[in-house]
Image (tube, rainbow, N blue to C red):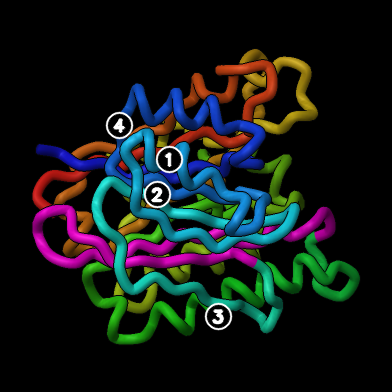
Amino acid sequence: MPVSVVTWNINSVRLRLPMVLDFIAQYRPDVLMLQEIKCTNDQFPTNAFAEAGYPYQAVHGQKGYHGVAIVSKVPLTDISSRVFCEIPESRHVSAVLDLGHGPLTVHNFYIPAGGDEPDVEINPKFKHKLGFLSELTSWFSEPMFAKGHLIAGDFNIAPHENDVWNHKQLLKVVSHTPVETEALNAILNGGHGWTDLVRKHVPHDQKLYSWWSYRGQDWDASDRGRRLDHIWATGDVAAHCIAAEIIRPARGWTDKPSDHVPVIATFAGI
C-alpha cells in the first residue's frame, strides 16, 4: 500500500487542532510534520493525536514561538534535534522510522523567516537565516546524508521563479532574494544531491504556492502566493515517490486558517 508524508506550518497547533484533526481524518497520512506549533512539549496535544491514530510523536517545542513536531502511525526511534547558529530556538527535530522497507530518517525544519530587510548588516534575522542555510550546507555534506533521508518543513524560501506570484517584483523581498534562492538551490543540487519531490511531479513551468499572506483581503482571488514549504529526499527515497500535491483549499477551510497549507508526498515501496 502507498504511504504518505505531510508537512504543514500550522501556526499554533492548539489554536488549529480541530482543522488538523479534520485533515488527518480525511487524508490519513502516515507521518505528519508540523512547524510553528508555538507551545512547549507539555502543552502539545499528545492525547488528541494518539486518539486519532498517531501515538508516536517527536516534539521539540518552545513557549509561544517556533516549535516543530512529528506525529506518526509507526514507531519513531533515535529522536533528536539540532541547534543552528548557537541560537537555542526549536527549529529542527528528526526521527528514524520504518514504513516497511527499512530505516528512513525524517527531518522536520522550520528555517528562519529572515525578517523584512535582506541585509545582514542591519537585520540580524536575515543574518541568522543565511547562517542557518550555511550550517545546513555543511551538515548535509556528511556521508550519512548519501541515502535514506527525507527532509521537510517550512523552508521560508521560494526557490524558483514560478514558486512566487511575481518573480521580478519579489527579487528584493525576503524569501525570494537571489542570495536565499541560490543558497537553497546549492543545497538541493550540491553534496549528495536531493530531489524536490513536489517539483518531481509538478513541472517548473507551472505556478505553485503553499503560502498566502494574511494581509490580502481575498487570498484566492489575488493569488499572491509563494511556495515556502518543501519535501526533499535523497535519491534512493525519491525514486519511490509516486505523487506529490499541495492542498490549496486548506487556506480557506476555516475563518482562522494557517497562512500555509499541507504538502503531501506519496510513496510506494519505501
> Which one is earlier in the sequence, the residue at label 4 or at label 1?
4
Residue 49 bears which disc, if any? 1
> Which one is earlier in the sequence, the residue at label 2 or at label 3?
2
Distance CA(mark 3)–CA(mark 1): 32 Å
Q: Is residue 236 left or right of residue 89?
A: left
Residue 28 bears which disc, if any? 4
Residue wearing tag 3:
135
Please tell me whether mark 3 sits on a helix, a strand or a loop: helix
Question: What kind of residue is marked 4?
Answer: Arg
Q: Is residue 23 left or right of residue 163?
A: left
Vertically, is 129 above or below 204?
below
User: Dot 3: few (<14), some (14–19), or many (≥20) neighbours within 10 Å?
Assistant: few
Q: Is residue 114 left or right of residue 187?
A: right
Image location (x, y in percent) of residue 222: 68, 19
Q: Are marks 2 and 1 in contact (CB under 8 Å)?
A: yes
Distance CA(mark 2)–CA(mark 1): 7 Å
Image location (x, y in percent) of residue 79: 39, 70
Please tell me whether mark 1 sits on a helix, a strand or a loop: helix
> Which one is earlier in the sequence, the residue at label 4 or at label 2?
4
Distance CA(mark 4)–CA(mark 2): 12 Å
Residue wearing tag 2:
71
Residue drawn 75% across the image and 49% down it: 173
Residue 161 appears in view: no
Q: Are marks 3 and 1 in contact (CB under 8 Å)?
A: no
Residue 157 bears which disc, if any? none
Magenta stretch holds residue 207: no
Q: Nearer the viewer, residue 107 or 225?
A: 107
Question: What kind of residue is marked 3?
Answer: Glu
Give the farthest residue toward the right.
122
Please tell me whether mark 4 sits on a helix, a strand or a loop: loop
User: Dot 2: few (<14), some (14–19), or many (≥20) neighbours within 10 Å?
Assistant: many
Image location (x, y in percent) of residue 166: 65, 35
